[in-house]
């Protein structure tokens, strides 16, 4: 069964008299353990799609199932719970909590969102910090880290709850290209090791090639789907 | 380990100057209230002590209607011996009563053999009177601090006006209930400083001399002044005593006795009440200060951290948690202000006590202000400040917890 099934997703934004059709009937399926990217110019609807898939926003039309749940029917609190249990987030601006150390930032979802016992927390955080190469920075605060280090910590935070799905909206937009490649590579390695589905958006043509499945967006519509390894979806 | 408390404290430390400013504002408020409360409270207690212990006693018992006409010291409203016995029995059986003193009050003419004027006198049993109003001896500015039969304690104003000294002979002439006039000679044993309030300018003679001057066949008592073991239980004892004596009716079926606390007898009670009202408003001001400053700082805290709130909400933090985080911050600020304020206030009061500030009250000069801080005041003020701090954070915290994560994340 697909991890994500989207049928005819639409999203309209109404600002005063003007209505913006941010998504105009987008349909796609994403299988578990995929490494997917939504690509398109600025304003093409990437953020809108990721927000809807991430249960942060509701579509104006269409249906959406994530991990077997019809997420369009969830209320505010249920959405929060669903995100906490099934989805990891990586942000363009890293969004680490400034008053928490790297270790504590990674621990945050385990304590404040889920309720994981101490020993298991320590184990999971240790493993992840090791995996993202941040073990030696664990006691630093975000403002003592470089952009790449922050994003590594953020990846660890997104993965620590063992989510089915990690969403990353332009995760490399604030990084230089070498660091950007390293971050995307790290995400891919994490997918390989943990079978977590990663979906990221980008308008950066250089790192587009790193994705295994590419959804090309233009004006809120899916223009093309590209799959590395020859297969093409419609 | 991450927890809400740690996050709250670190966020407060993150904006150190602002936290310090807000906490100082609360601290100043707390110090101000503590000092005002203690100084006014101690002042009040001392004043009440002066009034009750130098003249009034804590409670007084009269025949029904006596207090209403106390200005003319009516002899026909005195208590007859069987009635006095009833009151004595009630008082002897009352656990909170330390001691009591019967008085015969009357007005008469006072003469130094060349001039004559009016005088108001209390006939007392000195040992009992001195135990009931223990500050009475301290009012005797000249002469000895005792009273025996044939002697008089003369009010200072009268002594000065009539040019009478300690040891001088004087004469008191009084009309008794039957209308016959009688005189008696006294030696001035001491000069008595006046105090504010009713009876504060009365002279004192021995009860037996009063009986003799008024030609009573047996002592008829005008009032019985009562001293309690614990002044704090005044209203309790008053209620029980009133209840006990209410059963005693006169032939017309009206209550025989009336029981008054000092509050009903001294005009200073209104001053004491004013002090309480002022204290109340000062407390209200503290609450306003805390409310406004905490609310202000928490609104700013929420506004500055919108994106952070968005992040927390996006990764699944439930609204209740976000609410608690900000409430904790207000709570910690309140604790900081309250604790520092209590320490600073106590210190200031301690210094105030060391410096021995003196003040005057009526004829009493150079009373040393001894402020004491009641632990329950410290506690109520701290608890109030902390509760108000949490309450003031409620609205901003609520707003933070209800934010839509995508809008919060878009915020710049
Ligand atoms: N909150 C909003 N209100 C109004 N219009 C919006 C809002 N969010 C996005 N849009 C519009 O929707 C379209 C798609 O935006 P978005 O999904 O952010 O694109 P991308 O992430 O690809 O740059 C754009 O035209 C944008 O202006
Ligand atoms: Mg975008």
Image: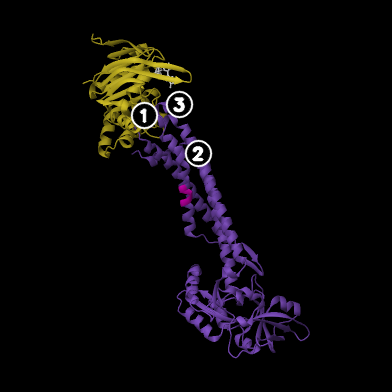
Q: Which mark is residue B411?
A: 3
Q: Position of residue B63 (x, y in %)?
A: 57, 78
- Where is B50 relative to A84, above or below? below
Q: Which residue extends farthest right?
A: B114
Question: Cα distance, mark 2 to mark 3?
Answer: 20 Å
Q: Position of residue B362 (x, y in %)?
A: 66, 68
> Residue B314: which quarter of the image?
top left
- Where is B81 relative to A182, above or below? below
Q: Position of residue A125 (x, y in %)?
A: 29, 32
Q: How are the residues colored?
A: by chain
Magenta segment, prevailing SS (helix, strand or loop): helix
Q: Residues within 10 Å of mark 3 (few under 14, many from 20)?
A: some
Write the residue at 45% across / 32% down: B305
Residue designated by label 2: B297
Question: Cα distance, mark 3 to mark 1?
Answer: 14 Å
- The residue lying toward the viewer, choosing from A121 and B76, is B76
- Does the magenta run of residues contain A228? no
Q: Which mark is residue B314?
A: 1
Chain with colour purple in the figure: B
Asked which secondary structure carries label 2, the reply is helix
Q: Which mark is residue B2?
A: none
Chain at numbered mark 2: B
- Where is B202 relative to B334, above or below? below
């Amino acid at each position: 069964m697909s991890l994500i099934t989207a049928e005819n997703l639409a999203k309209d934004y109404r600002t005063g008299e003007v209505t913006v059709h941010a998504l105009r009937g987008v349909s796609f399926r994403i299988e578990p353990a995929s490494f997917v990217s939504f690509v398109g110019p600025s304003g093409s609807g990437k953020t809108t799609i990721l927000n809807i898939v991430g249960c942060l926003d509701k579509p104006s039309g269409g249906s959406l199932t994530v991990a077997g749940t019809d997420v369009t029917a969830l209320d505010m609190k249920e959405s929060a719970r669903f995100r906490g249990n099934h989805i990891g987030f990586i942000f363009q601006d890293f969004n680490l909590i400034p008053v928490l150390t790297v270790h504590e930032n990674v621990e945050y979802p385990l304590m404040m969102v889920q309720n994981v016992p101490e020993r298991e927390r320590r184990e999971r955080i240790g493993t992840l910090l090791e995996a993202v190469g941040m073990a030696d920075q664990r006691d630093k605060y975000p403002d003592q880290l470089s952009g790449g280090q922050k994003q590594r910590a953020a990846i660890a935070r997104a993965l620590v709850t063992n989510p089915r799905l990690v969403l990353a909206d332009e995760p490399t937009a604030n990084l230089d290209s070498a660091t950007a490649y390293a971050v995307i590579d790290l995400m891919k390695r994490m997918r390989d090791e943990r079978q977590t589905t990663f979906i990221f958006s980008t308008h950066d043509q250089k790192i587009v090639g790193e994705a295994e499945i590419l959804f090309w967006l233009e004006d809120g519509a899916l223009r093309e789907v590209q799959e590395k390894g020859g297969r093409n979806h419609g | 380990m991450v927890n809400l408390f740690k996050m709250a404290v670190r966020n407060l430390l993150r904006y150190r100057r602002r936290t310090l400013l807000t906490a100082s504002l609360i601290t100043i408020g707390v110090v101000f209230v503590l000092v005002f409360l203690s100084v006014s409270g101690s002042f009040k207690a001392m004043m009440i002590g002066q009034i009750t212990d130098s003249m009034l006693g804590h409670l007084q018992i009269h025949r029904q209607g006596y207090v209403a006409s106390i200005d003319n010291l009516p002899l026909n409203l005195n208590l007859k011996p069987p009635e006095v016995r009833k009151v004595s029995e009630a008082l002897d059986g009352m656990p909170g009563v330390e001691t009591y003193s019967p008085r015969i009050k009357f007005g008469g003419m006072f003469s130094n053999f060349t001039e004559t004027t009016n005088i108001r006198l209390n006939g007392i049993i000195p040992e009992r009177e001195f135990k009931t109003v223990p500050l009475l001896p301290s009012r005797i500015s000249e002469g000895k601090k005792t009273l025996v039969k044939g002697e008089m304690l003369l009010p200072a104003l009268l002594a000065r006006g009539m040019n009478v000294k300690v040891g001088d002979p004087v004469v008191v002439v009084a009309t008794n209930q039957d209308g016959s006039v009688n005189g008696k000679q006294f030696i001035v044993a001491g000069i008595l400083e006046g105090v504010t309030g009713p009876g504060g300018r009365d002279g004192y003679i021995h009860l037996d001399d009063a009986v003799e001057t008024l030609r009573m066949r047996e002592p008829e008592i005008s009032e019985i002044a009562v001293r309690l073991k614990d002044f704090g239980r005044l209203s309790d004892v008053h209620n029980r005593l009133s209840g006990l004596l209410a059963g005693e009716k006169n032939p017309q079926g009206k209550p025989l006795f009336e029981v008054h606390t000092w509050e009903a007898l001294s005009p200073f009670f209104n001053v004491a009440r004013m002090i309480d009202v002022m204290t109340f408003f000062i407390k209200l001001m503290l609450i306003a200060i805390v409310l406004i400053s905490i609310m202000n700082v928490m609104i700013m805290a929420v506004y500055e951290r919108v994106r952070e709130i968005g992040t927390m909400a996006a990764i699944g933090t439930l609204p209740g948690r976000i609410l608690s985080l900000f409430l904790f911050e207000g709570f910690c600020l309140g604790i900081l202000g309250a604790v520092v304020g209590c320490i600073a206030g106590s210190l200031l009061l301690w210094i105030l006590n060391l410096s021995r500030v003196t003040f005057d009250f009526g004829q009493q000069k150079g009373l040393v202000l001894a402020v004491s801080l009641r632990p329950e005041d410290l506690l109520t003020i701290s608890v109030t400040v902390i509760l108000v701090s949490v309450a003031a954070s409620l609205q901003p915290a609520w707003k933070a917890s209800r934010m839509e994560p995508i809008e919060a994340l878009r915020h710049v």
